[in-house]
Every structure is written in C-alpha cells, then in structure tokens.
C-alpha cells in the first residue's frame, strides 16, 4: 500500500512530464493520479492509526540504513496530508485552466506530485540522513513551485527569501541531529530516542533549541516566520493551500517527534518557551493579518497565527508532561492536533477560495473586490464556511479546537506552582484577543470582499468558479462542518495518536447527546446540540418573518443622509475597516503615511491627491536587517582575498591542503 | 424528559418576556435621573409589536446575508440563553456548552450583525461594524481572564455548576478575587450591551454610534428581530453577572414550585438592580472617544488579572 502511494505520485509526476505539450490531458493525468495516491494515503494512514506501525528497510544491512517507519503520529500527518491533497488535487484540475497556453502545465503537475511525495517521505523517513535528503527535496521543490510565476519580480524575491530561510532552518536541523548522532553513533531515529535518555542536560537543551529554530523556521514561528508571508502568497493558489495547510504542519510533526519521542519532553522550561513563542506567533500573526489588504498575504499571516495556536497546545502539553501530569498533557496535545487538522482544512479551503477569487477577478487586492456574493454565490457560501471555521464560531470546526485549547490552558491550575498558572492564563487572554482579531480580520475579508457593490471592473466581471474548483472547496467545507459537529468521532482517534507520545490513552469521556467532557471538573460540550438549538431558533423567527412575506417587498436605495449612495465609492474600505486596530497597536505597526497633494493655480483646487500608508514589519526591520547588513558588510571585507590571479588561488588551495594534512597527521581528534 | 422540556420552554418564555421589560426599566431610570417623565416601562413591547406589523424596506444592494443575519444572530443569542442559568441551576441543556461556548455564541451573533452592516454598502454600516469588532477585540482578553478567575474558584467553566457552587458557598463567595472579577465583568457588560461610555444606545448621530450604525438599514419585521435579539442579549449578560457572582436564591431543578417562584422573583429583582445600576452609570458618565476605549477595557483587563493573581495568593501555590 505504501509503495502504491509512492507509485501513484511518481506516475503523476512522470505523466505530467510526458504529456507536457497537451495542457488539458497533462493536468488531468497528474492531478487525478495524485488524488488516487491521496485516497490510498488516507486508507493507509487510517489502517496504521488503528493497527500496527509500518516499517520497511531499504538498505539490507549496509552501513547507512535507509528505510521507512510509520507509527501512529506519522500516520496522522500522512492522513492530514492526504486529505488536503485529495481535495486540492481535484481543485487543481480546474484551477490550472487559468495557466493553459500561458505556462508549462507539465512543470507544475510534476513538481506538485514530487512535492507531495516528498512530504509523505519526510513523515515516514526512519533515519536522519534519509530525512535530510527528502526534507531538502521538499524545500527545493516547494521553492520551484513558489517561483512558478517567475516572470514577476516580487515572486523571485519571495522565492529568494524562502530558499535562504529554509536553508538556515535546515542548518539548525542538522546541528540538532548531529548532537543526537554524537551520542547514539547511528543515524537511525530509533536510536535517537535512546540517545535522548543518556545525553547530558546541556546537550539536550542545545538539541532542543536547534530543533526549535530549525523546524520552527519551516513552521513559521515568530521570529523565524519572515519568509512565510512572502512565499505562500506568491505560489499558485493550489500550492499555497498545500504549503499553508500541510507543509508547515510537517515541521510541527518533527517538533513533536523531537521534543517528545527523542528528548522525552523532560524540561518544563522547554514547554514554557514553546508556549510563549506560540502565543507571540498567534498575536503577531493575526495583527499583521488584520491590516493586510492582499488576501493571500492575509491568509499567510493567519497561518502564522494558527501555528501559534497549535504551539500553545503543544507547549501546554510539554509543561504538563514535564510536571508529571500525562492526562493533562494528553488533553493539550489533542487540542493541538485537533487544531492542526482543522487548520489544514479551513486554511486549505480559504486559500482555494482566494485562488477562485484570483481566478475570476485577477486581483488579490481586497480593495478592488466587493459584491462577489452575487457573482460567485456558490464559492461565497463555501468560503463563508471556511471563514466561520477559522473564526472559531460554533458549531464549526475551529470552535471545538479553540475550546479545547482554552480548556487545556485552564487545566494549568492543576499544577502546583504559581508561575505556570500565570503564564498559562496570560496565554489564554492573548489567545482570546487573537480569536477576536481573527474574527475582525475575516469579517473584513468576507464583508469587504463579497458583500455590497463591486469596487472595480475586475470584481464586476467576476464569474463563478468552475466545477472541479467548487468540488475541491466543497470537500473541505463539508469537512469543516463535520469536524465541528462530530468531535466525538474525531477525539477518540486523536486520543490514540496523542497517547503514542504522551503515553496516556484515556483523557476524554463521552456521554449521551454527543457530549464529550474533560475528566477534571464538570466541563462538557456538545456541538450537535448547539447546532440543533440554533436550527430550532432559526426556524421560529423565520416563520414570523416570512409568514406575511410580501412578494413586492419595497426595495430602495441605501440610506446616506439623503444623498444617493448607490455607487461603490461610498462604501467603507478595507483599510478604514481595520484602522481602529492600526491605531490601537500603533506601537507595533509603526504606521507611516504620506499625503501628497498637488494644487492647480489656486490652493483651493486640488489637482491630484496621493495617499500612501505603510506599516513596518518590526521583526524584519529590527532583527533581520541588522544581521543581513552585518553579513553583507563582512562579506565585502572578505572580497579583499579575491585577487583575480590564478596563482593566488592555487596558493589558497595549497595552504588549505597543508593545514588539512597537519590535522590528519596530528591525529585529528586531539 | 418532560420536566426538562417544560423547563426549557419556560426558560425561553421568561427570557423573551423579561428582556423588553428590562430595557424599559433602564430607560425609565435614565429618564428619572434626567428629570424627564420618560416612556412607559412597557414601551419596548409596544415597539417590537409595532415593528412586527410593519413591512421592511430593503436596500437594493443587499444579498441573502442581510436577510439571514438577524435570524442567525437571534438564534445564537437564544441558544446561549439556554446555556445560562436564569433562576434554576442544573439546566437541562447545560451540558451542551459552558461559559466559553456562551462567549463564542455571542461572537457568532456579533459576527453576522457586523457582516450585515457591510452588506448595504453604506459607510455608516461599515463604520459601525468596524467599531463593533474593535470593541469586541478589546473586551475579549479581559473577558477570558475573568472567566478563568471565576472558573478556577469553582473548578469548572460550566455555568450551572458555577452558580450551584457559588450559591452553596454562601457569604464566603464574596472573596477578593470574586469581587475583582465582578468589577472586570461589569465593565465588560457595559461594552457588551453597548452602553455609555462605550456606545450610546439612544443616539442617532451616525458618527458616535456603534450598534445603531450597524443596524441602520434594517426596518420593519427584521428590525424587530434585531432589537429583540439585542434586548435578549442584554438580559443574558446581566443574568451572567447576577448568577455567577450573586447566585443566592437560585433554585435547583429538584426544588418545589414555591422555591422556583421565589427564585424567579429574586432573579427579577437582581436583574432590575443591575439594570438600574447600569442606568446610573450611563447617566453619570459621558461617552468616551473611541480611541480612549482601550484605556477603559485595560482597566477591566487589570481587574481580571488581579482577580487571578489574588486567587493564586489566597488559595496558595
């Protein structure tokens, strides 16, 4: 089965190359075979979650062991990948029509398949060398996908930032792995877990920090997030959906692997650090998302926020685990995994939605949208479901996972010290702020983008997305609802997965009326009942409203102080909508604005008016730019050794050789 | 089963019946302090009844969101109403959601009202929606911290359980952290119900209002639903204040008919007291500028944080 998955992805990749010239056939062959592979992946991972782990040795006993190892945790991530890939592949068959005749579909189709395959292999690699190879494959292929529309300069810049950051991350991952190898004397992950037990605390701390930086870069944790808002929006939307929905989750998978399986999550301060970074990521991510006008960039910032929420759960879990409370650790881990699953689905949905908007209006700028609910009614409903889920409104999926996250933070009060209690409650307060700002942000997205009148010609001529795109989004929308109202089916599965690293299986109890509750305290929730009540209460006033419904309901202009306001120029803009937040957090945003007015003849007559408003990316400006500046200035100094004459270079080589010989002769290790 | 159903229906009726009266009493109290006669305390009933008989005038720009929003918001608020103990603890449907669920149901109601505010394409609507979400964002952290402070005291976020436990504590419930959390939640209640100094419910000057600006385009039956929803929400927020902090007199479900009637009377008195207190606050303060509101809600945040810290100090590490 596992090799079937690999085979179908390879077939997809190969057929895309072969059928390169025939756009339509090429897109169908590559995306349908990836959809089949994804279906196989879903079956395979479910069989592992409920059955035994899968392992396969490729090397046959040679020195470097290569092989696959899929346990419950890895299977969960393969499941998440496969679900996303299935829906996104169907969506892609419709979405790539945009590129027919303009771009090379074979290139996109084959890289897409290899990208997904590399993610599956990352999740199933059983040793560090193989892991690093497929990790690098994933990074490079995703780089090529990011720069698919390479004729745009901003895309090339995004790709550059991405490839640099991702390699810095890989460097730290190597460092972390080498620390393990130093103790285990083997590259196999199985021996890493043993090594984690015998390492000195200092080495463990270092391995933790390096892994956090390395994988954190890929996950987009603040302050290593800076590539994410560049790279995700520039990729084609179907790839963005996978990058934001799935790829950054792979980094979370490795974080869990390293922290729990390899290092045993033994230090409470690791948990605090992860929790604090998660909280900062959540709040900063959403703060930048709220004021963003580019819809894909906004979604990318929101991914940083959601990674933050996931990390809050993981951090809490690590704190509980280190304090010897496996039941609580398991609840917090389930909250994180639940949110991870939900995010991969609603963020995939929203990125596909943004893709549909881009497809039919050719703009990502929210200020040019508006009125799309009438032009794209079906897409609008699906996107609204995604919006409601990401805002964590009941009874949609985000609500369940955020509720669980709040509850796990509240459970911190079962700990005995004051410090974690206060840290966890501050984190909860920040999470509450994050949730409210997320609602603000996505209200802006949907309200400005879809409602009222079109703000530009682009939006006026928008057309409904085509059927495969609607099906792809529909799958995710349906899953968003199901994950919201059926948590009692999902939780036992997640419990098993969390148990594979926290060692505790029974954390939730399930009662009648689809209730699930947390053991300590009488805390329970039942989203189906909430949904049922909502439906009843929707029904009653609807009858009142429509019983005496007049066919000839009076329709009139929108009221505007007696002035006719039936043009889109009177509408509230997205910038204005998010202005209060900009003012509130102006210490973080440091908004700059320039107003440039040119007058004609008299100062009363304005000829032209130019307004520009910018915000600063604090972390980029104050953390990265000094470093980049330093590196560049030092590199310029190094230029002195570049003389341009062959003799000097030969001299350098000779000198290096002599030093290396000395090193070998003196015994190396001394 | 039957008793649960009766209890649910009774609660719905009580909520719907009392909420306009509460609005009427607040208006009457404000009129008293402003040395006016003021409308009858039953005026809100007449208003809703009148609006329900009228036709709606709909803006030509709107989509189905505009029609659906009042109903969804109303349904969310009413659903929250069944999760909040009114005069009986041990709610039949209390298992379905806790205090956090109530907060998110209110958020759902707010989300749709704000969405509808953008639908007609008027600047006023957008301004109202933007400000409403802004205020909500400021409220939320303080709200969550006070929920934590309350929940820690009793060990649960389930509202029936909180009321039951606190009323069992008697006068001991008036601990420092409980009082601090009450002050925090009172400020939040002002913001949540859209009262001075956060919002002015009686203004019709477009630039100063929040909630009224959002619902500017509604008329007739739809406006009736919107207004009723807002009044219900106000009653529920006050009920939260009353039954989390002063649940004494609340009846348990097994209680006899006399106790229940008594509990109902006590509940009505408590709610009206809070309403009158709210009216006093409204008449004695001026509306704050929008960008000064973070100060007010920071005060609330500080109070809730102090409540948490004092809980940790009092209850020991």
Image (cartoon, rainbow, N blue to C red):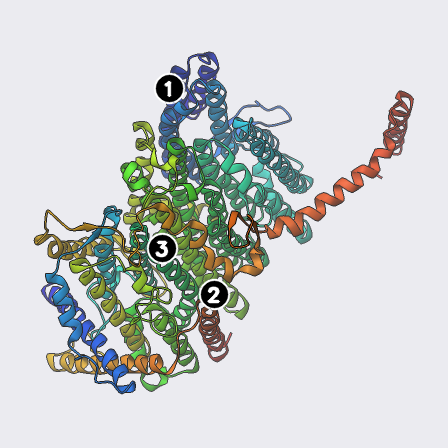
- Residue shown at the point (59%, 24%) measured from the top left: A61
Quadrant of the image for the C terminus of chain A? top right
- Residue A219, given in percent of the width and then of the height, sits at 53, 43
Q: Chain of mark 2?
A: A
| Res. A193 image quadrant | top right
- Residue B222, given in percent of the width and then of the height, sits at 19, 58
- Residue shown at the point (22%, 83%) measured from the top left: B269
Marks 3,1: beta carbons within 8 A: no
Give A332 or B78, whichever is nearer the viewer: B78
In the image, which is nearer the foreground, mark 2 or mark 1? 1
**In the drawing, what numbered circle is on residue A607?**
none
Marks 3,2: beta carbons within 8 A: no
| Mark 1, residue position | A28
Tell me which numbered mark, 2 or 1, is placed earlier along the sequence. Answer: 1
Relative side of A215 to A564, left or right:
right
Question: Pointer 1: residues within 10 angstroms few (<14), some, or many (20+)?
Answer: many
Relative to B254, residue A290 above or below: above
- Residue A503, given in percent of the width and then of the height, sits at 45, 50
| Mark 3, residue position | B123
Query: How far is disc 3 from disc 2 in space, using C-alphas?
Result: 38 Å
In the image, which is nearer the foreground, mark 3 or mark 2? 3
Quadrant of the image for the N terminus of chain A? top left
- Residue A599, given in percent of the width and then of the height, sits at 55, 49
Give A60 or B259, whichever is nearer the viewer: B259
Query: How far is disc 3 from disc 1 in space, using C-alphas?
Result: 46 Å
Question: Pointer 3: residues within 10 angstroms few (<14), some, or many (20+)?
Answer: many
| Mark 2, residue position | A425
The tally of labels here is: 3
Disc 3 and disc 1 on one polypeptide chain: no
Instruction: Name the secondary structure under disc 3.
Output: helix
């Amino acid at each position: 089965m596992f090799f079937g998955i690999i085979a179908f992805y390879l077939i997809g990749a190969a057929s895309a190359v072969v059928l390169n010239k025939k756009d339509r056939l090429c897109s169908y062959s590559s995306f349908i075979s990836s959809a089949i592979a994804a279906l196989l992946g879903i079956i395979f991972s479910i069989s592992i979650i409920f059955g035994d782990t899968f392992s396969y040795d490729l090397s046959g006993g040679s020195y470097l062991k290569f092989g696959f190892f899929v346990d419950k945790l890895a299977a969960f991530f393969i499941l998440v990948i496969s679900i996303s890939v299935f829906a996104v592949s169907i969506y892609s068959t419709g979405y790539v029509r945009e590129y027919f005749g303009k771009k090379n579909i074979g290139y996109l189709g084959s890289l897409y398949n290899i990208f997904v395959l590399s993610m599956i292999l990352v999740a199933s690699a059983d040793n560090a060398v193989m892991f690093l190879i497929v990790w690098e494959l994933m990074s490079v292929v995703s780089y090529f996908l990011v720069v698919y529309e390479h004729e745009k300069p901003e895309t090339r810049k995004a790709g550059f930032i991405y490839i640099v950051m991702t390699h810095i991350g890989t460097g730290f991952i190597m460092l972390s792995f080498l620390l393990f190898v130093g103790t285990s004397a083997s590259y196999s992950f199985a021996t890493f877990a043993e090594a984690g037990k015998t390492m000195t605390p200092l080495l463990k701390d270092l391995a933790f920090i390096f892994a956090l930086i390395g994988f954190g870069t890929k996950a987009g944790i603040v302050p290593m997030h800076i590539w994410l808002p560049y790279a995700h929006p520039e990729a084609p939307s179907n790839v963005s959906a996978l990058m934001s929905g799935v790829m950054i989750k792979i980094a979370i998978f490795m974080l869990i692997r390293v922290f729990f399986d390899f290092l045993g999550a033994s230090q409470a301060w690791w948990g605090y650090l992860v929790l604090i970074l998660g909280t900062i990521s959540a709040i900063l991510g959403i703060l930048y998302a709220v004021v963003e006008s580019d819809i894909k960039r906004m979604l990318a910032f929101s991914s940083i926020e959601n990674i933050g929420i996931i990390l809050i759960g993981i951090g809490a879990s690590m704190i509980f685990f280190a304090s010897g409370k496996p039941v609580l650790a398991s609840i917090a881990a389930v909250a994180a995994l639940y949110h991870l699953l939900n995010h991969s689905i609603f963020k995939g949905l929203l990125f596909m939605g943004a893709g549909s908007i881009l497809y039919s209006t050719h703009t990502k700028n929210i200020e040019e949208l508006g009125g799309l609910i009438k032009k794209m009614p079906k897409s609008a409903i699906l996107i609204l479901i995604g919006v409601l889920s990401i805002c964590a409104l009941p009874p949609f999926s985000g609500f369940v996972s955020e509720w669980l996250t709040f509850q796990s933070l509240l459970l911190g009060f079962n700990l005995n010290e004051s410090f974690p209690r206060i840290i966890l409650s501050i984190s909860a307060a920040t999470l509450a702020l994050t949730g409210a700002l997320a609602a603000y942000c996505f209200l802006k997205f949907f309200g400005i983008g879809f409602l009222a009148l079109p703000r530009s010609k682009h939006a006026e001529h928008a057309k409904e997305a085509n059927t495969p795109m609607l099906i792809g989004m529909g799958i995710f929308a349906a899953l968003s609802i199901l994950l919201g109202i059926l948590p009692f089916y999902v939780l036992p599965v997640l419990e098993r997965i969390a148990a594979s690293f926290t060692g505790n299986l029974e954390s939730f109890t399930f009662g009648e009326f689809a209730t699930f509750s947390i053991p300590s305290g009488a805390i329970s929730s039942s989203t189906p009942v909430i949904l049922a009540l909502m439906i009843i209460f929707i029904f009653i006033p609807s009858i009142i409203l429509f019983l005496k419904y007049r066919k000839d309901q009076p329709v009139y202009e929108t009221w505007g102080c007696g002035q006719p306001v039936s043009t889109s120029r009177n509408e509230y803009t997205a910038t204005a909508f998010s202005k209060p937040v900009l003012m509130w957090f102006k210490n973080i945003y440091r908004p700059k604005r320039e107003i440039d007015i040119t007058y004609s003849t008299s100062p009363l007559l304005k000829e032209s008016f130019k307004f520009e408003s910018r915000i600063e990316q604090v972390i980029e400006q104050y953390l990265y730019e000094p470093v980049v500046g330093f590196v560049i200035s030092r590199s310029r100094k190094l230029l002195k050794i570049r003389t341009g004459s062959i003799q000097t270079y030969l001299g350098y080589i000779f000198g290096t050789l002599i030093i290396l010989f000395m090193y070998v002769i003196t015994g190396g290790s001394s | 089963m039957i008793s649960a159903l009766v209890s649910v229906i009774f609660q719905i009726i009580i909520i719907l019946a009392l909420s306009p009266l509460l609005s009427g009493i607040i208006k009457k109290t404000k009129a008293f302090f402003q040395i006016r006669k003021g409308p009858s305390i039953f005026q809100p009933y007449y208003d809703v009844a009148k609006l329900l008989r009228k036709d709606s005038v709909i803006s030509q720009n709107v989509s189905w969101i505009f029609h659906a929003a009042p109903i969804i918001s109303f349904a969310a608020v009413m659903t929250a109403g069944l999760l909040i103990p009114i005069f009986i603890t041990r709610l039949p449907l209390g298992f379905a959601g806790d205090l956090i669920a109530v907060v998110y149901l209110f958020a759902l109601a707010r989300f749709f009202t704000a969405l509808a505010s953008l639908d007609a394409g008027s600047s006023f609507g957008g301004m109202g929606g933007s400000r409403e979400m802004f205020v909500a964002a400021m409220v939320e952290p303080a709200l969550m911290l006070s929920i934590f402070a309350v929940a820690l005291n009793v060990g649960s976020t389930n509202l029936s359980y909180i009321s039951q436990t606190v009323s069992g504590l008697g006068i001991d419930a008036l601990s420092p952290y409980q009082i601090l959390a009450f002050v925090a939640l009172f400020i939040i209640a002002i913001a949540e119900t859209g009262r001075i100094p956060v919002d002015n419910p009686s203004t019709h000057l477009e630039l100063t209002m929040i909630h009224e600006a959002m619902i500017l385009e509604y008329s007739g039956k739809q406006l009736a639903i919107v207004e009723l929803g807002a009044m219900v929400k106000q009653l529920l927020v006050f009920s939260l204040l009353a039954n989390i902090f002063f649940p004494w007199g609340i009846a348990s479900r097994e209680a006899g008919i006399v106790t229940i009637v008594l509990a109902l009377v006590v509940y009505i008195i408590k709610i009206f007291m809070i309403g009158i207190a709210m009216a006093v606050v409204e008449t004695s303060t001026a509306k704050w500028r929008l960008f000064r509101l973070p100060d007010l809600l920071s005060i609330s945040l500080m109070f809730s944080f102090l409540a948490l810290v004092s809980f940790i100090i009092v209850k020991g590490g």
